[in-house]
């Protein structure tokens, strides 16, 4: 909200001053420290997220709240000094507020779940106090999860809770209930048994008793309409059955038996009245539970589907309409031409539950208001009366309009993401845990001569070929085990050998790896350039050994190498900068909601990571060029202790993060006649490597020491890290050579250290053992 002409030439802190109303703000100090750090170190610095309010141009003295992601990048002159800073900033206020809203939504969800749990506990208490025997079995094993005292009293000497039905009561396996209960679970059809003889033992290891039962097996469903268990209502009617048979056998005792039966009927009548009162109480409590439920619930009574109960959540969907006591089509007449009347008729007549997902309906939220398309996911469950006949329908409804619209937006964003990934000259894909491609960009068509549509659902072996798959399968296995993998190798694809830089990023969902993202760059030109450079170095060394008089020719070859590196690093900067700018411009065009998607964010981070590594390689080539073009640094008297302390201070965050113990013992080596910049580069590279390549099972310890040894000043850096094998030590100081891929690096640090020491007439030695640690010895000439 500024004009270019009004801010050019002014200090950034004058144009954007501190908001005096934001008492906790440290925005200007954060930005100032970032700029000062870039000037001091010559390295880019990023503030990922911070609040920095800006003045409102239309209201003097008023500030607008903003959150930013800022990157400060130095522009370095040929003398190594920072002359400008490229200041890039992105407004992320909407993202920050979206995260805050998400946290608030999660809190509301947590409260709703707690309320639902409270209602569940209340219902369990009601069932526990019920006079009828009640039990709940879960899963296909019919495990006792809930039972009330009345049920437990039927088997006073047996353990039931937590045991499968046929483990707790094994004598039931060969009886009729075995087939009955499996049929209820598999079909969902309720079974009602009357006076069924089921011999069981009331006490464990006791003889079976012939017991007659009245019982009901009713299926339990989850939210998706799937049967998850069985609800049992049971009554021991042995006494009643024996009494009735006794009446039939003993006519002479009929009068007396009738009297006893009348007394018993009277008692039962009293019990029935109590049970009816209790049932009415439970019905009222159940209605109260429905009214307090966080989901939309209503009960439609009779064949005309009259609203008998409407809870507040359901009524809130239609805030301006009167529903209770009206038939459905009278309350919502716009449903008459929809599929809803036929669905309700089917549920009412067939007595079968109906589940719908994301069904669009044209409805008016207010009486006489405009119709709008509302998406619903709902369940229609028939309600049965005491005779088992359907007399109403229980409705559980969820409005999912927002979810459907979000999904459509995501699908649109996915199409835009496809356009972005298809425009990049790298392979981008996603493979599931069966190693089958579920996403691939258009680059696959030029690499493997097949359409993207033909790549999908094929395995990696089928796409890349046997030879290339054999080289990649170990890395794929590590990615599917949850490890992020980065490697560079030559891949023998069917179309020819390509040198590739590959990143595999695992897709972890709920603690399990569902697949992995793959980002593959063709680095054949860079590798071939590096190999050519290595060949030229080897040829130069062989020539130096055989032809001592060819020094002038060797110097010319080195100059050619320097020019090659300089040209390569210079010519590669423009393409990678163009790719980076193209990616950032595309990200600006993408909608914010698509950037919040996990898959989009992961692929973008992979692209940025690949660009960053490419830029770092170019930067390393530039540093090597500087080193080789200017190998005669001005000598000065340098304090060894001061240089070591400054390097330790620069690495303070890494040291603190890794818990590394640093010991400095420079002894009598107070000063040295050496280039301060070069000495600092040597100490920094050796000390940072000792920390980065620490042993994961040890507390990292690094010792920096110094002593006078003959004609040299010996600086020694010793660690207890991963160590280096004897075969690897021979190639340790080769350009771009790395032996560990689990940490970032370009493979030029030790190469530059050796070049500095060689140029100064010194030498460097290394002693190392895998798993024990390493010692680097740098010999600096005293004269």
Image: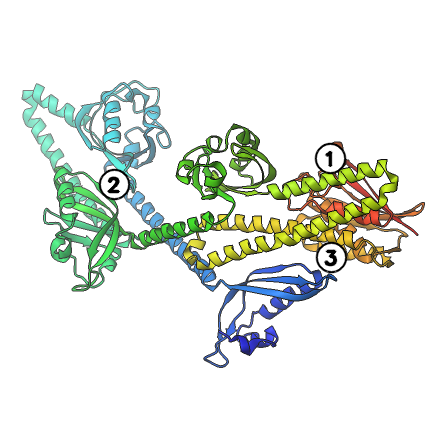
Q: Residue furthest bottom?
A: 60
State the residue position of label 2: 130
Q: Is residue 120 left or right of residue 688?
A: left
Question: Camera-side residue: 457 or 165?
Answer: 457
State the residue position of label 3: 649
Q: Nearer the viewer, mark 2 or mark 1?
A: 1
Across and down, in percent, residue 699 comes to 70, 43
N-terminal of the pair, mark 2 or mark 1, is 2
N-terminal of the pair, mark 2 or mark 3, is 2
Examine the rendered structure and indicate whether residue 507 appears above or below residue 604: above
Kindly indicate whether the residue at mark 1 contacts the one at mark 2 (C-beta within 8 angstroms).
no
Examine the rendered structure and indicate whether residue 767 appears above or below residue 686: above
Q: Nearer the viewer, mark 1 or mark 3?
A: 1
Instruction: In the rendered structure, find residue 333 and report the number of the disc placed on it.
Output: none
Kindly indicate whether the residue at mark 3 contacts the one at mark 1 (C-beta within 8 angstroms).
no
Marks 2 and 3, how far apart in space?
Answer: 73 Å
Q: Quadrant of residue 252?
A: top left
Question: Camera-side residue: 242 or 311?
Answer: 311
Could you say whether the residue bearing mark 1 is in a helix, strand or loop? helix
Could you say whether the residue bearing mark 2 is in a helix, strand or loop? loop
Across and down, in percent, residue 492 comes to 56, 32
State the residue position of label 1: 728
Examine the rendered structure and indicate whether residue 183 appears above or below residue 119: above
Marks 2 and 1, how far apart in space?
Answer: 78 Å
Q: Is residue 295 left or right of residue 594?
A: left
| Viewer can see residue 430 | no
Neighbour class for label 2 at 10 Å: few (<14), some, many (≥20)?
Answer: some
Could you say whether the residue bearing mark 3 is in a helix, strand or loop? helix
N-terminal of the pair, mark 1 or mark 3, is 3
Question: Camera-side residue: 141 or 403?
Answer: 403
């Amino acid at each position: 909200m500024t004009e270019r002409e009004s801010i050019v030439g002014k200090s950034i802190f004058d144009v954007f001053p501190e908001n005096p109303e934001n008492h906790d703000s440290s925005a200007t100090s954060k930005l100032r420290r970032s700029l000062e750090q870039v000037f001091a170190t010559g390295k880019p610095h990023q503030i990922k997220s911070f609040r920095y309010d800006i003045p409102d141009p239309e209201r003097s003295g008023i500030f607008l709240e903003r959150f930013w992601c800022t990157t400060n990048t130095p522009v370095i002159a040929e003398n190594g000094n920072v002359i400008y800073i490229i200041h890039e900033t992105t407004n992320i206020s909407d993202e920050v507020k979206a995260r805050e809203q998400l946290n608030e939504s999660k809190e509301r969800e947590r409260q709703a779940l707690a309320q639902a749990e409270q209602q569940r506990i209340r219902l369990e208490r009601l069932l526990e106090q019920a006079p009828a025997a009640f039990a709940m079995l879960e899963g296909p094993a019919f495990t006792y999860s809930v039972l009330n005292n009345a049920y437990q009293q039927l088997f006073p000497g047996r353990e039931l809770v937590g045991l499968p039905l046929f483990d707790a009561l094994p004598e039931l396996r060969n009886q009729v209930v075995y087939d009955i209960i499996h049929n209820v679970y598999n079909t969902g059809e309720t079974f009602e048994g009357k006076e069924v003889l089921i011999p069981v033992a009331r006490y464990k290891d006791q003889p079976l008793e012939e017991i007659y039962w009245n019982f009901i097996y009713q299926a339990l469903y989850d939210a998706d309409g799937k049967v998850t268990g069985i609800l049992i209502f049971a009554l021991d009617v042995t006494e009643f059955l024996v009494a009735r048979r006794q009446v039939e056998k003993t006519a002479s005792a009929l009068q007396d038996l009738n009297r006893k039966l009348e007394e018993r009927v009277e008692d039962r009548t009293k019990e029935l009245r109590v049970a009816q009162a209790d049932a009415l109480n439970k019905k009222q409590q159940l209605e109260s539970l429905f009214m307090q439920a966080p989901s939309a619930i209503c009960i439609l009574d009779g064949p005309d589907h009259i609203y008998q109960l409407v809870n507040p959540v359901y009524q809130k969907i239609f805030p301006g309409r009167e529903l209770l006591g009206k038939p459905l089509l009278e309350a919502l007449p716009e449903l008459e031409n929809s599929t809803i009347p036929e669905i309700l008729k089917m549920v009412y007549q067939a007595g079968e539950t109906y589940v719908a997902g994301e069904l669009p309906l044209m409805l008016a939220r207010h009486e006489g208001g405009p119709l709008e398309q509302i998406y619903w996911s709902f369940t229609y469950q028939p309600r049965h009366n005491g005779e088992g006949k359907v007399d109403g329908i229980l409705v559980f409804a969820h409005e999912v309009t927002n979810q459907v619209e979000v999904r459509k937006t995501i699908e649109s964003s996915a199409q835009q993401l496809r356009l972005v990934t298809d425009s990049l000259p790298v392979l981008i894909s996603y493979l599931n845990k069966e190693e089958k491609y579920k996403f691939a960009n258009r680059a696959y068509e030029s690499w493997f001569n097949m359409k993207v549509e033909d790549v999908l659902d094929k395995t990696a072996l089928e796409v890349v070929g046997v030879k290339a798959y054999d080289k990649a399968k170990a890395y794929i296995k590590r990615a599917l085990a949850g490890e992020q993998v980065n490697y560079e190798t030559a891949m023998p694809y069917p179309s020819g050998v390509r040198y590739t830089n590959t990143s595999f990023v695992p897709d972890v969902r709920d603690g399990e790896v569902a697949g992995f993202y793959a980002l593959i760059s063709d680095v054949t030109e860079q590798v071939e350039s590096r190999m050519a450079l290595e060949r030229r170095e080897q040829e130069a060394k062989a020539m130096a050994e055989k032809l001592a008089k060819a020094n002038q020719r060797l110097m010319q070859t080195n100059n050619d190498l320097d020019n090659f590196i300089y040209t390569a690093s210079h010519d590669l900067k423009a393409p990678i900068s163009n790719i980076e700018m193209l990616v950032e411009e595309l990200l600006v065009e993408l909608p914010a909601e698509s950037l919040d998607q996990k898959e989009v964010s992961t692929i973008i981070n992979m692209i940025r990571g690949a660009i960053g590594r490419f830029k770092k390689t170019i930067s390393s080539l530039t540093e090597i060029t500087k080193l080789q073009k200017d190998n005669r640094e001005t000598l000065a008297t340098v304090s060894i202790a001061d240089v070591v302390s400054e390097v330790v201070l620069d690495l303070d965050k890494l040291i603190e993060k890794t818990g590394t113990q640093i010991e400095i013992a420079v002894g009598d080596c107070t000063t040295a006649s050496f280039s301060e910049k070069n000495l600092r580069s040597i100490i920094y590279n050796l000390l940072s490597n000792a920390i980065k390549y620490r042993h994961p099972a040890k507390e990292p310890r690094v010792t920096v020491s110094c002593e006078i040894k003959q004609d040299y000043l010996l600086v020694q850096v010793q660690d207890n890290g991963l160590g280096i094998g004897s075969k690897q030590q021979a190639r340790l100081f080769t350009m771009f050579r790395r032996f560990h891929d689990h940490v970032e690096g370009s493979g030029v640090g030790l190469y530059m250290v050796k070049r500095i020491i060689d140029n100064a007439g010194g030498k460097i030695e290394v002693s190392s053992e895998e798993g024990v640690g390493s010692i680097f010895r740098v010999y600096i000439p005293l004269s």
